[in-house]
Image (cartoon, grey):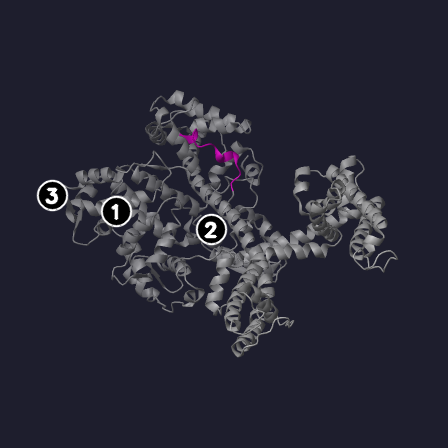
Amino acid sequence: MKAKNRDQSLSDSRELDGSYDQLTDSVEDDFELSTVCHRPESMDKLQEQTKFTKKELQVLYRGFKNECPSGAVNEENFKIIYSQFFPQGDSSMYAHFLFEAFDTNKNGSVSFEDFVFGLSIILRGTINDRLNWAFNLYDLNKDGCITKEEMLDIMKSIYDMMGKYTYPTMQDDVPREHVESFFQKMDRNKDGVVTIEEFIETCKKDENIMQSMQLFDNVI
Amino acid sequence: MAAGVAAWLPFARAAAIGWMPVASTPMPIPPQEKTKGKDGLIILNVSGTKFQTWRTTLERYPDTLLGSTERDFFFHEETNEYFFDRDPDIFRHILNFFRTGKLHYPRQECIAAYDEELAFFGIIPEIIGDCCYEEYKDRRRENAERLQDDEEMDMSNDAPPVNLTYREFLWRAFENPHTSTLALVFYYVTGFFIAISVMANVVETVPCGVLPNRSKEMSCGDRYALAFFCLDTACVMIFTVEYLLRLIAAPSRYKFMKSVMSVIDVVAIMPYYIGLVMTDNDQVSGAFVTLRVFRVFRIFKFSRHSAGLRILGYTLKSCASELGFLLFSLTMAIIIFATVMFYAEKGSTASKFTSIPAAFWYTIVTMTTLGYGDMVPKTIVGKVFGSICSLSGVLVIALPVPVIVSNFSRIYHQSQRAEKRRAQRKARLGKIRAAKIRGTNVYMRYKQNGLLINSLEEASKEAGRALVAKAPSPPFESQHNHLLHCLEKTTNHEFVDEQTFQANCMEISVMNKSGSRASSLSSSPHGLSSCCSRRHRKKSSFSLPSTNNQELSTIQIRERPVANSRSSLNAKLDETVPLKCDKPYITPSMVSLSAPVVTSSDGHGSITTAAYSQSNIVRVSAL
């Protein structure tokens, strides 16, 4: 019988009972907890900087802290949280784009301030602010214009959230067609990209979009 | 569903801003918020221990007692709190479930009490977190087995049922000797004869003294051949009769013949019969003698009489791989040392180590520290290696044996646990999947109900009848459903469940996009365009009040088959939705499976539960 160290015997016993998952490492790796803790600024300051009332901030923070006790959410957690709202499809790509949009200082984690600033714009901002934010979300490389490739990525991520079981059956070229129709509507000068001015102008003229922007007034 | 992250729902709804500019169709109307100041603290008084939590925390899980209107039954006016006459210690865990979304099982609590509390508060145990689930299931199984054992003991002490067939009675007598006196007698008689037979086989070979007309000593078997033969015949007759009776009485003869015990029985009595038919020929007598060896297998028949033997046999069987490994390593060591000893002793004269296989015997005897001394090395090299062999024998054999013993007990327990876990996981995943499916069905029913309610409200106003009181829907559910609805609008595709999807794939060819409303209402329509157009039209102008009324009355009167009429009212893919209404939905937090629709949209549940004709509290309050 060969001598076994603890790890070896642990993994052996796990192999023996068939519950060992080859993908995960030994148990010790999971014991390293991240000790990073982030505390938000005081509520007064946040109240000045955003358009939420104290009570709303309280509700938001409680929910935030519940899911992310360490005070900041990284992209993994963000995707996990968002995916719980869309059990049928794959929302990871769209969650990634959202994360990029919320993480304004590009440090790989969304703190409560980032979270609340973003929400403040979407839920309490003017139409212009909201449209700006949406444009920022679409503009993946933040160069001030949306190309067809960027829009296609966004569109695919939205359609991915629907999942496989839809009615009518999802064809492969549906996102592309949708992008085409979007560009037809938005791209005024037909130069293949949508700039912020074209975007805002077209959206303001579109009644549907204006109406849907009103939805966000009552979210909180 | 996503109730665990309910607090993040505003964020998810805000994130929908990314869909708005892309959508080509208008978004659905969001659900109206009730009074916003409802987020207050609730006091829960459980047998004197006061717990407090936010109202919204409890309402995350509308399928449970605390999250639904059911808790109003426990409201105590004088003290303005909710009073529950239950165990506060266990309640702590239940409340933690609402707070964190994970249910834990406290190890020190009694499993039955815990189950009762879960059932009372409407939480199904399958959502217990992974950290505690195994322990929970183990305790539950133990408890169930204990109860079952008690039941069985009670049962076996009862008087046997009178109307057994003769065959069943016989089988029962064989398997359970304690059931009747006759069976007990038979049991002891066969045991006695097994012992006699084995003793006779043994005594047969003892030398019995010298007969006057023979020179050498004879064994008792030869001297009293006739007596032994008669004894043997008697035993074999008893065994044969027993075997035949068991064969007749067995409920499944094929299974019986395959079982180990029956094989042992056959092997025990065959030599006698073979010996009968064989002549006293010299050629076959050798084989005959070999067959007599099999008579010793009669001793294994004792395993019917002893449970310990059976357990030993089973454990050996289950530990076979470990024993096999021990044997393999021993064989390796034996071969190595035998080879070494052979070549070491090759030079010495008159060496007993004539070949490597001959040296096997020496190696085995030395390694097991027996040391018979019939083969000893003579050369110095041989002695050196001989001593190494003997020392390593101690290690190779003595060390693994306790390890094997403990290994065997560990593997035994572990394999049992692994089996359990696998079975549990399958069942759990099945239920969780069903809950997920139910989640999407909640949403789809919300869509249909939303329109139904709107149209019916209008219709009732027109008809001047107050229908039903619209109970407030849980804000979380309706908002989540609205969110999914927006996504559908953005992408111009609709969520369906798996079955519908398969059915649609097959029905693609049959889809007709007729827009005729009247026919489509009564028959089964298809086509998304017609549905959408109808839905739009329904929203804008409720031009079918009469039909709605009529349908409504049929809904109210009829029972189960009403599902069809309801589907025709809401048409579109209801036909293809195989009305999983019929199946009880398993929700993550609802024990009583009889009220699937309560959770989807309580305001709409009133109508639909009437449609489903499943008795529950909601229907009573609605009608």
B390 is higher (above) or lower (below) than B613: below
Q: Would you say B227 lies left or right of A128 here? A: right
Q: x%, y% of residue B114?
A: 61, 55
Q: Amino acid at mark 3?
A: Asp
The chain letter for the residue carrying disc 3 is A
Q: Of helix, strand and loop, which one carries label 1? A: helix
**Residue, disc 1:** A154
> Which chain letter matches label 2?
B
Say which of B185 and B158 sits in front: B185
- Left or right: B194, with B477 as reference point: right
For marks 3 and 2, give the CA distance.
49 Å
On whether disc 3 and disc 2 are found on a single subunit, the reply is no
- Element type at marker 3? loop
- Residue shown at 81% from the left, 50% from the top: B193
SS state under label 2: loop
Specify the quadrant that holds the C terminus of chain B. Answer: top right
| Residues at circles 1 and 3 in contact by the CB criterion of under 8 Å | no
- Magenta residue check for B582: yes
Q: Nearer the viewer, residue B438 or B386?
A: B386
| Label drawn at residue B12 | none
Residue B462 appears in the figure: no
Query: Mark 2 highlights which residue?
Result: B60
Residue B510: give x, y in percent of width and height: 37, 24
Percent of width and height locating residue B384: 53, 78
In magenta, the rendered stretch is B573-585
Question: Whole-percent x and y of residue B481?
Answer: 40, 43
The answer to whether residue B459 is magenta is: no
Above or below: residue B592 compared with residue B43: above
The disc label shown at residue A191, or none: 3
Q: Residues within 10 Å of mark 2 (few under 14, many from 20)?
A: many
Q: Amino acid at mark 1?
A: Ile
How many C-alpha atoms fall within 10 Å of the one at disc 3: few (<14), some, or many (≥20)?
few
